[in-house]
Image (tube, helix red, strand yellow):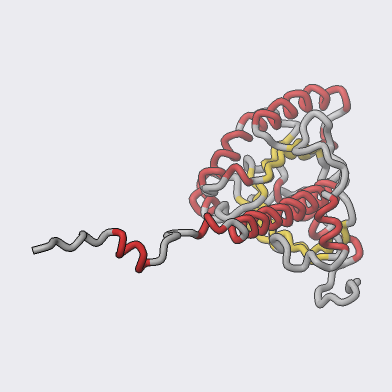
Amino acid sequence: MDQPKGRNFQVHKDRVIVGFSTAYSKEARIDDKYDFDPRVKQACLSDRGSTAGLKICKMIVVGDTGVGKTCLVNRFCKQSFDKDYKATIGVDFEVERFEILNQPFTLQIWDTAGQERFQCIAAAYYRGAHVVVVVFDVSDIETLRSAQGWLEAAQKENKQSNTLLVFLVGSKRDLLNTSAYEDVEKEAIKTAQEMNAEYWSVSSKTGERVKEFFFRVSALSFERSVMQEFEKRHVAAKQMGDGKSFQINSKPQSTQNASHKRPCCKN
């Protein structure tokens, strides 16, 4: 375990992030940046980022039953792969701690059930999410058809759904040859664009692009939280510097009362 100088948190050296993972596809990505915003880097690396932004990000993983949600989470969190499918009952929970630009960052991963009979339970855990990961099976195109429905269910439980980071992940990439996968990817990218999501293709069995995906999620989430904090401070500072924003009455009370008195009548 490594402990950054002057910090009271610990992360494994395999959870240290100093830059963005590049997006999987140029056609379907959330933004076209390849590194952190200079303001974020300056604040964090100069030790002024300790009070900026969210330090905990809630990520929910949704999708049809059997698409590989749990395998995706286990491959990253436990470096394991279990080919024997066991349906998630309700929700499973994992926590991963990172060091991003010398700052602590915690990713809460909520692996939700895909079976309809558990939806009432799982939906309760959608609330308060910052990231939605919709998983489908690249070897079963029908699971892609329901991706939009899963996103809408997550958005329903999050009133400020326009702030969600959304990812569409095609799992089980190892099951298709290159030719067959190309057709699936075209449709997946189109769906991701309609969902305003970033598309990724992974294999939990081989580990292909799993770490890169989670690093991408974490880096983007961290930067967004810090930038939102900057924006809040900017608005607050602007209001404090504008006397009109807080001015209720410009006239002293006594002056106002005097101006409304009726003139005395002479007898």
Place of residue 260 in the rendered image (x, y in percent of width and height, measured from the top left): 27, 59
Depth check: give the residue in front, 85 or 4: 4
Give the number of callouts.
0
Place of residue 226 in the rendered image (x, y in percent of width and height, measured from the top left): 73, 56
Instruction: Locate the C terminus by quadrant.
Output: bottom left
Depth check: give the residue in front, 37 or 178: 37
Depth check: give the residue in front, 39 or 139: 39
Please indicate, yes or no, whether residue 51 appears anywhere in the rendered image.
yes
Residue 8 sits in quarter: bottom right
Place of residue 195 in the rendered image (x, y in percent of width and height, measured from the top left): 65, 33
At x 57%, y 35%, the residue is: 149
Instruction: Specify whether 240 is left or right of 100.
Output: left
Give the farthest residue toward the front.
267
Place of residue 94 in the rendered image (x, y in percent of width and height, measured from the top left): 71, 61
Instruction: Specify whether 102 is left or right of 31.
Output: right
Residue 251 sits in quarter: bottom left
Depth check: give the residue in front, 221 or 154: 221
Give the farthest residue toward the left.
267
Please indicate, yes or no, whether residue 170 appears anywhere in the rendered image.
no
At x 81%, y 65%, the residue is: 103
At x 72%, y 53%, the residue is: 227
At x 63%, y 35%, the residue is: 147
Instruction: Locate the N terminus by quadrant.
Output: bottom right
7 w.r.t. 94: above or below: below
